[in-house]
């Protein structure tokens, strides 16, 4: 064990450096050999010279390096400030806003259906509100169901809670009705009992 | 001498076993492609092939012509970076 330890620590810097250089040249030779094999196979399979074309065709597809054009020679921001006419509503829309506008205008796409549903829900609630009586307004001011979460409520929750509030007067009315019936029932029982 | 060669063998084995050799190979390939070394050598290959004739060129021909040129053409920055990594590995695992 001691001998091996000595051999490891006895390796001084020059030897380490020589070792590093050897490893490096092994790696480079590997890379060269790899390339040779690739090229040789390409030659024998017949596809090595496939990317050579005549000078004229090469010039046609050269990379373009001018200002204002991309590498294919096309102008790439000429539609920035143009305006398009919407075929649906015949309005003039800026090019960058055209796609989202079309989405909403034609009624397709994810967001437009969501917005439409929201509008329907809120318009339904507005209609219901105008039909309720004066005494129902007390219940609308009730804070029981919405304590502490008013600002964070999403619109769908607001709609749900609002529709619930409309039912509170109905529930209390039913409760009163049941109570009245019970009292009547009791009194008829008493009368009957008394008559016996 | 045999201690040294044993040491070298151990190091080389470690290099392979830990996957470091593969990583270094990949790094070298990537760097050489990036800096255009491959394209340069491929162009040289084309000359060799045109010289020897498409049908008769052998792997040996290519190796003999390409390898010395390839060694020379490696850019200094790539060489330095690779040597650095190798030395770091040796420093970690040889002492």
Image (cartoon, helix red, strand yellow):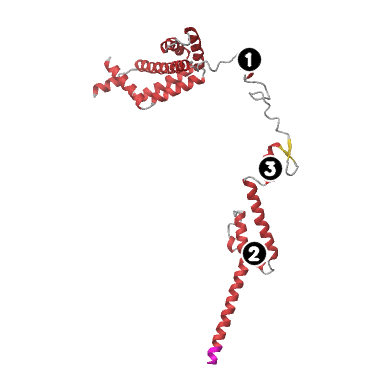
- Above or below for A112 versus B30: below
Image mark 1: chain:
A
Q: Residue at x 68, y 42 (%)?
A: A102
Q: Residue at x 67, y 59 (%)?
A: A124
Residue A131, position in %: x, y?
Answer: 69, 65
Give the residue pinned by disc 2.
A140
Q: Is residue A136 magenta?
A: no
Q: Quadrant of residue A181?
A: bottom right
Give the residue pinned by disc 1.
A56
Distance from the alpha carbon under mark 3 to that under mark 1:
45 Å
Task: Tell me if mark 1 has few (under 14), some (14-19) or many (20+) residues whose alpha carbon lies within 10 angstroms of its own.
Answer: few
Q: Magenta segment range?
A: A191-196
Residue A3, position in %: x, y?
Answer: 24, 21
Residue B45, position in %: x, y?
Answer: 48, 12
- The reply to whether the C-beta atoms of the residues labelled 3 and 1 are less than 8 Å apart is no
Give the residue pinned by disc 3.
A102
Q: Residue at x 43, y 20 (%)?
A: B82
Q: Nearer the viewer, mark 3 or mark 2?
A: 3
Q: Quadrant of residue A79?
A: top right
The first of marks 3 and 1 along the sequence is 1
Q: Is residue A142 visible?
A: no
Image mark 2: chain:
A
Query: Where does the N terminus of chain A fall, quadrant-wise?
Result: top left
Q: Residue furthest bottom?
A: A196
- Above or below for A117 versus B7: below
Distance from the alpha carbon under mark 3 to that under mark 2:
39 Å
């Amino acid at each position: 064990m001691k001998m091996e330890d000595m051999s490891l620590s006895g390796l001084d810097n020059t030897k380490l450096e020589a070792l590093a250089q050897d490893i490096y040249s092994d790696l480079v030779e590997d890379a060269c050999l790899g390339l040779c094999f690739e090229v040789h196979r390409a030659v024998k399979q017949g596809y090595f010279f496939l990317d050579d074309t005549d000078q004229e065709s090469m010039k046609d597809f050269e990379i373009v390096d001018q200002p204002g054009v991309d590498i294919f020679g096309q102008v790439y921001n000429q539609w920035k400030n143009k305006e398009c006419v919407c075929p649906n509503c015949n309005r003039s829309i800026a090019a960058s806003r055209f796609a989202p506008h079309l989405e909403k205008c034609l009624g397709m796409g994810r967001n437009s259906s969501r917005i439409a549903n929201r509008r329907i829900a809120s318009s339904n609630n507005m209609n219901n509100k105008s039909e309720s009586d004066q005494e129902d307004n007390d219940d609308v001011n009730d804070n029981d169901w919405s304590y502490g979460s008013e600002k964070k409520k999403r619109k769908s929750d607001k709609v749900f809670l609002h529709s619930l509030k409309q039912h509170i007067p109905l529930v209390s009315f039913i409760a009163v009705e049941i109570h009245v019936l019970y009292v009547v029932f009791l009194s008829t029982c008493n009368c009957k009992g008394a008559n016996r | 001498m045999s201690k040294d060669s044993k040491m070298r063998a151990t190091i080389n084995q470690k290099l392979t076993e830990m996957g470091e050799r593969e990583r270094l190979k990949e790094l070298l390939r990537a760097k050489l492609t990036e800096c255009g070394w491959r394209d340069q050598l491929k162009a040289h290959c084309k000359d060799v092939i045109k010289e020897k004739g498409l049908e008769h060129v052998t792997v040996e021909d290519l190796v003999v012509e390409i390898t010395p040129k390839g060694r020379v053409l490696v850019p200094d920055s790539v060489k330095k970076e690779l040597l650095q990594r190798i030395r770091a590995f040796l420093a970690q695992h040889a002492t």
